[in-house]
Structure formats: structure tokens, C-alpha cells
Amino acid sequence: MDGTVLIADDDRTIRTVLTQALTRAGCRVHATGSLSQLSKWVEEGRGDLVITDVMMPDGNGIDLIPRIRGQRPDLPVIVISAQNTIVTAIRATEAAAFEYLPKPFDLPDLMTKAGQALSRRPRKSDPALESPSPREGADPAMPLIGHAPAMQALFRMVARVLNADLPVLIAGEPGTGKSIIARSFHDLSDRSGNDHAVLTPADAGEETFSRIIEKTRGGTIIIENPSSFDQAGQARLIGLIETLEARAERANLPRLISTTGADPQREMVAGSLRSDLYYRLAGVTISVPPLRSRVDDILPLADHLLARAAVQGLPERKLSEEAAGNLRVYSFPGNVRELENLMRRLALTASGPEVSADELREALDQPRGQDAAVVPDAGASGISVTSAPLSDMVEAHLRRYFDLHGGELPPPGLYERILHEFERPLLEVALDATGGNQLKCADLLGINRNTLRKKLTDLNIEVTRRRKLM
């Protein structure tokens, strides 16, 4: 490896480690803890590669990149940062950094990137050199924090396709933050100045689609779990896409971002997701890893969530060393959403500023009462039991539905849509429980048998007599 490397990091240990490693590899190295000194070296024409931290005592390393590009467009910059968020990855990409690596970084990986940067300089005609300066952006409501390789790969993918004119399908288990990532595609992109809208099965009417198309010109349409739309709803989604594709003013078309389960292709094979809809939505597929596969992110996320709870008015808490160790080995079937609920509960119930291991254990092992409800989850069977009363779960679902509309009210007709959405699974589960016996099912529900038959016909629910499942 040959060349002169300029290092800017306020951590003396990191400067020493990088200096020794690059010197052994054959490079000449200048290291500083100041961005102003780095700027001076660049202006003097020194260096063939820059490696810079983001948060420095005298500024932000990413904010310096446009000035470096203006002075020396052929000088590659590698960004290293402990700010392991999606916003950092996007800003580094928009600033045309050669590479972005989270701290603590893997030294052999950084050395490989440095070698690539020294051997392949960007040409002055590279499109990346003409990109606008990176804009400021706030982290989304649910923290998209992740040092784990899977999350860093996700951040890089989001950054690469953020402003591409392609539909994106975001796949993952419930609670992994898919909806927040979907919203990030709008809030952090060039479309953020225009409106966005969220489509759920409750909004699948023809009139709603027409209003959304007009509202989101040049913006974004987020489709929540298209496989949960009934066949008529999925057909209308296809019609919506075809309507958009037929329009002449393509520059003002909304972008489609969809969320789905962990394995959309299996949903397609099973028939719950139409293949012609899947291929229209999956221009780019991004998989969100479950929390249990990125164990190193659990404690930073927990600390962040406790701090955010304190900002929102809850008592300030921190985890004891023993509690932190126990939390790290918990599997979190409910993913980040479960972790968030747990941290808020501990912020309210802990007896002191430090959460003990016993308090954590009690929160994780809450007894399950008679009001427990069965909900979809990420386990092998697809089902788990939660201790929340059914009314609380319905309320949480409705609040999330309102939240998905970004502070605006959902389309009119909400009462009938929600009742319709609840009625189908209620009838299907009751039929399963009674083995398809309509007389027993009507008695279980407390309605007339003719009323049940009419509802089954209206909802197009097929009934076959079978063995009781419950």
C-alpha cells in the first residue's frame, strides 16, 4: 500500500492504532485531533486519502467533505463514527464519502477500504462529485441505531437507494422497525418537501386510493403489509400502480415503499400475496434483521430508549450491570418494539434510579392472566401469548394506525373500516374453534345463525366442516 493518509480523530488511541497499522502497510501518515488542522493539510495539497471521525471538538467531519470535494475532488474520504444511526450513513453517502465505517470498526476491514481508496481515486466526472451538500436530518421516532454488520449493511443499502426511482419492499418480523424505515425513505429523501400517505387494509377503498394519488404528487405512498389486504384490496393496489405508471407526468409520481413479513416470497407461494403485486412492489428488497441476531445492539438501544423516556417525562433510569447482562441474553421475540415497551415499563416501575436484575426479571416474567390475548409474532409457530388485555391491544393497534398517518386524520369512514377489519378474523377463529359447525359458532358468538350465514357470505368466508382445533 502506498500513499499519504491524513487522519482526524479526537481519540488519541484510535490515531495511534491507525498510524501504526498504516505505517506498517507502507503509508506515510499525518494524524490530528482537529478538523481545522485537517483542512489546512488538504488546502496545502497534502494527502492521498482522508480518514475522519464525525463528531470532533471543532466541528463535524461529514460537513467538511463538501469543502474537500471543492478543493480536491480526487481526494477520497473514509468516514468513521460512533454515531451508528441511519442518518449518519445517509449523510456520509450523500456527501460522497468513499466509505462509512461504524466504531468500533474492524481494523482489517478499514485497511482493505484504505487500500481500495488509494488504488482507485474518483474521477472528476464521477456523478457523486456533483451531488448536493448533505442536509441535516433528525433520527426517526424509533431509534434506527445499529453497529451490528447486518444493520450497517441495511443503512448502506438505504443510503444507496434513498433517492432512486424504484419501489422498495422492506421485509422483516413484527416490531423490527420496518414502518420507521419506510417513513425514513420519505423524511430523509428529496421527496420530503411533498406529502406522504400510508395505505393499510382499512384504507383499501377506491375513493381513498384516488385521494391518496392526488395528495402524494412527488411524494411517497407507504403500503403497510400488502399481503394482509384481501384479494379485492390487492387487485385495487395493482390498479393503483397501473394508474400511476400510465400517467405522463412521471416526474411528479409518488414513490411506493411497502412493508411486509420476514419472507414475502413464502407469502406469495402461500397465496396471501399476489405474485403480480409482489413483483410490482419489489424493485429493491431490504431485509430488516431481528433484534436477537444483533445482540450487540440491545444495550445501546436500551440506554437510548431509557433516555428518550426521560425526555418524555418519565423518571430517569439506567440498568444495573447485572440487569444489563440479563437483558443481553433475552431473545426478544417482539424485537425493538418489545424492547421499547419494556424500557418504558421499567422507567415507570423501578424503585430507584438503577434498574435491578430482579426488577428486570419481574418485568420479563409478568404473569399471564385470563384476559391474555393471542397475537401474531415471530416464533416458530407464528403465535405467542401476551399479558396485555384485549382492549389494550386494540387501543395500541388504533394508536399506531393514527400514528402512521403522520399527524393527519385517517380517511373518513374509520368506524366501519375498523369493525370490518376486526370482524373477519373473529369469525374465522370462531369457526376454527367449532370445527366449522355454524350452529355452534353462532351460539359461541351469541348471534343468530342466519345473521352468521349472511356475514360469512358478505365477507366471502369459505366454511368447511373439520376437526375442532380448540
Image (tube, rainbow, N blue to C red):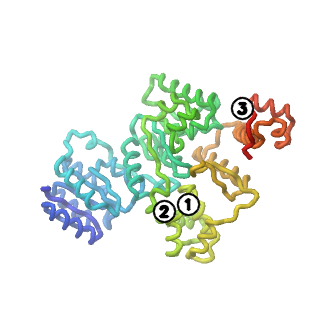
Q: Inspect the image, locate mark 3, and give the three-letter code of the amino acid beneath it.
A: Ile
Q: Residue at x 22, y 62 (%)?
A: 7
Q: In this view, does 108 lie to the left or right of 250?
A: left
Say which element carries label 2.
Answer: helix
Within 10 Å of disc 1 (Cα), the crowding (few <14, some 14-19, many 20+) is: many
Residue 298's tag is 2
Residue 461's tag is 3
Q: Quadrant of residue 206?
A: top right
**Marks 1/2: CA–CA distance:** 8 Å
Q: Which residue is drawn at 23% across and 70% down?
A: 16
Say which element carries label 3.
Answer: loop
Q: Inspect the image, locate mark 1, and give the three-letter code of the amino acid beneath it.
A: Leu
Say which element carries label 1.
Answer: helix
Q: Inspect the image, locate mark 2, and give the three-letter code of the amino acid beneath it.
A: Ile
Q: Do the numbered discs 3 and 2 sit on residues whose CB atoms are within 8 Å?
A: no
Q: Do the numbered discs 1 and 2 sit on residues whose CB atoms are within 8 Å?
A: yes
Q: Which residue is drawn at 47% across and 49% down?
A: 288
Report the residue marked by disc 1: 339
Toward the viewer: 26 or 410? Answer: 26
